[in-house]
Amino acid sequence: MHRSIFIFSALILILTFSSCRVDFDYAQSNGSLAFSKDTVFLDTIFSQIGSSTYTLKVYNRGTTDISIPSIGLKNGDNSKYRLNVDGEAGQQFKDIPLFAKDSLYIFVETTFDIGNLGSKEFLYTDAIQFDKENHLQEVQLVTLVKDAIFYFPKRLVNGQRETIVLDISETGEEIKVEGFELKADQLLFTKDKPHVIYGYASVPYGKTLKIEEGARVHFHKDSGVLIKENASLHVIGKLSQDKELLENEVIFEGNRLEPSYSDIPGQWGSIWISKGSVNNKIEYLTIKNATVGIFVQGDNTIGGTTLTIKNSQIYNSENINLWAKTAIIRSENVVLGGAGNISLYCNQGGDYSFIHATIANYWKHGFRTGVALQIDNSTNNDGSSFDLAKADFKNCIIYGSNPNELNLSMDPNKAFFFNFENCLLKFTKNTEDSLYNFNDVSRYENTLLNLDPIFVSPTKNNFLIKENSSVIGAGNLDAANLVPLDILGSDRTKNPALGAYEVIFIE
């Protein structure tokens, strides 16, 4: 028994001493470190908003364990960069061991206040230094910082952020979210600086939020714009000459500017047009990576137009791109691309006109049950239902990656009037439902079924058509003359294609 205890104790001592290293076990670093990159680009950030975390890997490719005497930021304690070296946060580190043929991770972040520099953009740089003097090695750090105008709810005396009522539930309860009401001097967004919104920015009763050409509006997580009753939104973008910069168009997206966030859905909330809001006008607007791109609540009356939207794109919404509920919408040259559920949802009746729309759901972020286009005059929980006074689609494409991209749901006790004229539809399901009788010319006129439109890159929401596309020349000329220019400004009055694009992509 005593002998067993002695052996066990000896093993513990051996393990303990073998796992402990002392300084003289390491040779001093001699400037021969290797790095995963010579410059860490932290991409673009907004002033006062922290960056993502970026990684630098440091290698000891030699056969000897070494100790790095110092790792630190060149600008020292004045640096706006933050480091984490092998799990320890700070800006300066001493005697960092690194085994032979091993590596360590350094994580880098920054937050920079452009403050009173008098510039809209500032290239902020520093360097991570390893050792010093003859053995000094450096990895450069580079960040582009943009100045912006910030909008956010106030913090109340109880520490909570102020809230606004977003909607009333069917049970009569207020749905509140963090938000605030825009002041009179905040109702014009120009292109001078980006606009960054935290929470929901509410447009007051009777007021109009005007967003001028070239403006960029960015939203934090769960943020958006609420257009109240009798208030309006006017987005006044214009056609751009540079198809990459889109210098004249208005863009709504999240507030993370890093390339890794460029295609992440659900980064922000929605543009929410409340019941009783009319005369909303949108032209040359791109909305991307929202939860619901635009939610439009009508008031079940055939009055003024709720929303006029032209030459605009909405895509990569986590749920629905354009959700219209008992609304009145007039649309020309609109592209509604991939969405996690439905691209266009005409819900609970309403009055809709879409001319030269590309409604194409090629969602690539997982499984979806929704379709490109869904139309219903469904019944509320309280038993009320609604008339679909009109749902007209002329020279449109309704397509996608699922077998069926059209869903019609009718309450027979209410009006349900719809019409597709010179449209390409994807619907492969065998059904005897009369709603899908594509030989019924009162509902379907000159319909193309299940012909590949041959888009350039639909999973990337590029819906330019190629030269062998079935939609070329398939449009109705009278409808094309109502919208004589396509979304890129090209004439379509001679041989109109279906959808928002007349331009043919030639490889």
Image: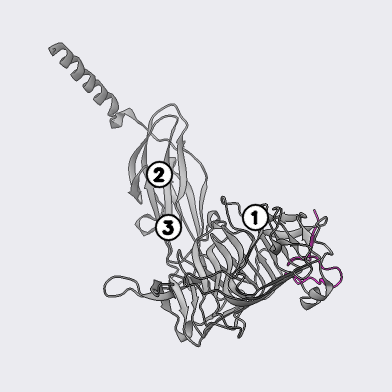
Please state if 288 lies on the left or on the right of 406 as rendered. Answer: left
Segment colored magenta? 486-507
Looking at the image, residue 65 sits to the left or right of residue 263; the answer is left
On the image, the x and y values in percent for residue 307 come to 61, 78
Label 2, residues with CA under 10 Å away: few <14, some 14-19, many ≥20:
some
Query: Which amino acid, by three-letter code, is at mark 3?
Result: Thr
Mark nearest the camera among 2 and 1 is: 1
Q: Identify the residue position indicated by label 1 in the image.
A: 362
Any part of residue 255 in sight: no
Residue 357 x/y as whole percent: 71, 68
Magenta stretch, main secondary structure, is: loop
Q: Do the residues labelled 1 and 3 touch (CB within 8 Å)?
A: no
Tag 3's secondary structure? strand
Q: Where does residue 358 sit, x and y in percent of width and height?
A: 70, 64
The CA distance from mark 1 to mark 3 is: 36 Å
Is 374 one of the magenta-colored residues? no
Query: Is any part of residue 191 visible from this angle?
Result: yes
Q: Identify the amino acid type marked 2.
A: Lys
Say if 146 sits above or below 260 in the image.
below
